[in-house]
Image (tube, helix red, strand yellow):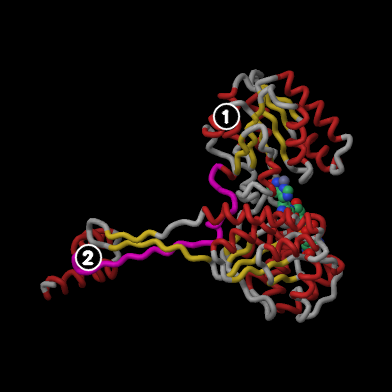
């Protein structure tokens, strides 16, 4: 864990090092992934079955690639009722927040007499990748599938690797609650390729979303352009701005909640109170003694954690904006006012009673958020990832007369004569016919 102080002369250099410490994309898998995608394109289901036998130790046939409805039911039925209730509560809240995001179409006639439109339509088909094994978060199934459903996507296909044939009941229960029934037990780059290009069993989709390991991320990068993808997520991050009026243990737990995701996760505390900073650092050490995921969280905190001592909250706001973190917690008296000054953060958690973990599960907004400072220009997953816009222009003779000559002039200036003539010829016809 780094201790930085804005009062120190070396601060800018230390801070730059902190910004640069964010994770990058793994490149050693580029060629293996290229080969896997080519095989899936050439041999379809047969290659998918071969790779699943090799990487997931699971023998499949074209008939068993897709998880049968009875299997989904049987697995979901293994989930304890209180956990199903928790998933349902989360799903209801996520669904209603995403429903509130749905945009309006535009349709109006302007002063020149042209009728202009902008219409939102949902994607036809989306593929949702869910990581296999212990890395799978059922909450992420809800966060990826529900916005697609709310947007009105016609078909949602899900791929989840099942190493040694083991299904994950919670993942299947979350899929069921989200209304996803088309689920394939395949993973890795081969699943991404199958979703992108299609096989006999898996029809192709238009966009692929969801997290995964380096093979999955690289495959998404390589199929991008043929299909759409969501952003490629880096390690999780939290920045916590807290004054000395907080309970140190609660702040320590919030830092560790991010750190326990991954050894590369980054947890940063910004505070104007040096004595409080010391108490939080001590509390982190105490909590690490008993935390089940202490090995991961301890590594993350040791290698990527930071405590920044600022002179005042103005400096805290400036640094929080520069960090443009995936998550920002504001644990201050006047948290709303501080949050209003933040321009760059994936999601903001406002007030001492609002830990980031609420947003991971039951807040309502999406927990798939921009990492690695991309919050400067990117946003979290939403219904907009599953919608597209089509614009329209309608005009009759009057509108064409009003705007056509300027179009002709611009086309001629660009040397595009057919463009100019397609408008000019109509204008000439209108004059001839005195329409
Ligand atoms: N919300 C979430 O669920 C979430 C969020 C963030 C990150 N993640 C990330 O998801 C990832 C999960 O990783 P995972 O590996 O457990 O599951 P995964 O589903 O991402 O990958 C498993 C697949 O990787 C492929 N693979 C493994 N070794 C390979 C090799 N040598 N060559 C080619 N392909 C190979 C196999 O096809 C296997 O099915 C982690 O990196 C985790 O950080 C998950
Ligand atoms: N904090 C993670 C995204 O950064 C999401 C998550 C899922 N489960 C728990 N947390
Ligand atoms: Zn989390």
- Mark 2: C-beta under 8 Å from nearest atom of ligand 2: no
67 sits to left or right of 229: right
**Magenta-colored span:** 376-398
Q: Quadrant of residue 404?
A: bottom left
Residue linked to disc 2: 400
Q: Does the magenta stretch include residue 385?
A: yes
The residue identified by callout 1 is 317
Q: Residue 211 carries which label?
A: none
Front position in the image: 50 or 380:
380
Mark 1 lies within 8 Å of ligand 2 (Cβ measured): no
Q: Quadrant of residue 308?
A: top right
Residue 174 on image: x %, y %: 72, 61
List x then y, in percent, for residue 370: 61, 47
Q: Which of marks 2 and 1 is in front?
A: 1
Please tell me whether residue 308 is drawn above or below residue 187 in the rendered image: above
Image quarter where the C terminus lies is bottom left
Q: Is residue 158 magenta?
A: no
């Amino acid at each position: 864990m780094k201790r930085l102080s804005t009062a120190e002369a070396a601060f800018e250099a230390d801070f730059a090092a902190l910004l640069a410490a964010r994770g990058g994309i793994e490149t050693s898998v580029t060629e293996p992934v290229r080969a896997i995608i080519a095989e899936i394109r050439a041999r379809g289901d047969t290659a998918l079955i071969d790779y699943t036998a090799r990487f997931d130790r699971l023998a499949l046939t074209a008939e068993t690639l897709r998880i049968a409805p009875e299997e989904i039911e049987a697995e979901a039925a293994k989930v304890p009722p209180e956990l199903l209730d928790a998933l349902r509560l989360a799903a209801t809240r996520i669904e209603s927040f995403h429903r509130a995001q749905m945009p309006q179409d535009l349709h109006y006639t302007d002063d020149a007499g042209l009728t202009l439109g902008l219409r939102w339509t949902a994607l036809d088909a989306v593929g949702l990748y869910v990581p296999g094994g212990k890395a799978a978060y059922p909450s992420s199934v809800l966060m990826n599938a529900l916005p697609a459903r709310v947007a009105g996507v016609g078909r949602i296909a899900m791929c989840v690797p099942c190493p040694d044939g083991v299904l994950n009941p919670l993942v299947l229960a979350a899929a069921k609650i989200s209304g996803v029934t088309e689920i394939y037990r395949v993973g890795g780059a081969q699943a991404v390729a199958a979703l992108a290009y299609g096989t006999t069993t898996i029809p192709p989709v238009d966009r692929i979303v969801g997290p995964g390991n380096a093979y999955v991320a690289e495959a998404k990068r390589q199929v991008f352009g043929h299909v759409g993808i969501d952003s490629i997520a880096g390690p999780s991050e939290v920045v916590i701005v807290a004054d000395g009026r907080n309970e140190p243990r609660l702040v320590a737990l919030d830092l560790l909640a991010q750190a326990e995701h991954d050894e590369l996760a980054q947890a940063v505390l910004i505070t104007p109170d040096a004595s409080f900073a010391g108490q939080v650092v001590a509390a982190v050490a105490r909590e690490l003694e008993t935390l089940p995921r202490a090995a991961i969280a301890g590594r993350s905190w040791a290698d990527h954690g930071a405590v920044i001592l600022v002179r005042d909250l103005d400096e805290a706001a400036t640094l929080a904006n520069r960090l443009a973190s995936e998550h920002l917690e504001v644990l201050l008296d006047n948290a709303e006012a501080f949050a209003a000054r933040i321009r760059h953060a994936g999601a903001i958690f406002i007030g001492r009673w609002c830990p980031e973990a609420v947003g991971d599960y039951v807040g309502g907004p999406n927990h798939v958020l921009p990492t690695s400072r991309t919050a400067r220009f990117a946003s979290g997953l939403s219904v907009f990832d599953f919608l597209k816009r089509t614009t329209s222009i309608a005009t009759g003779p009057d509108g064409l007369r009003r705007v056509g000559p300027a179009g002709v002039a611009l086309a001629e200036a660009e040397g595009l004569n057919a463009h100019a003539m397609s408008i000019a010829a109509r204008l000439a016809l209108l004059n001839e016919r005195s329409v």
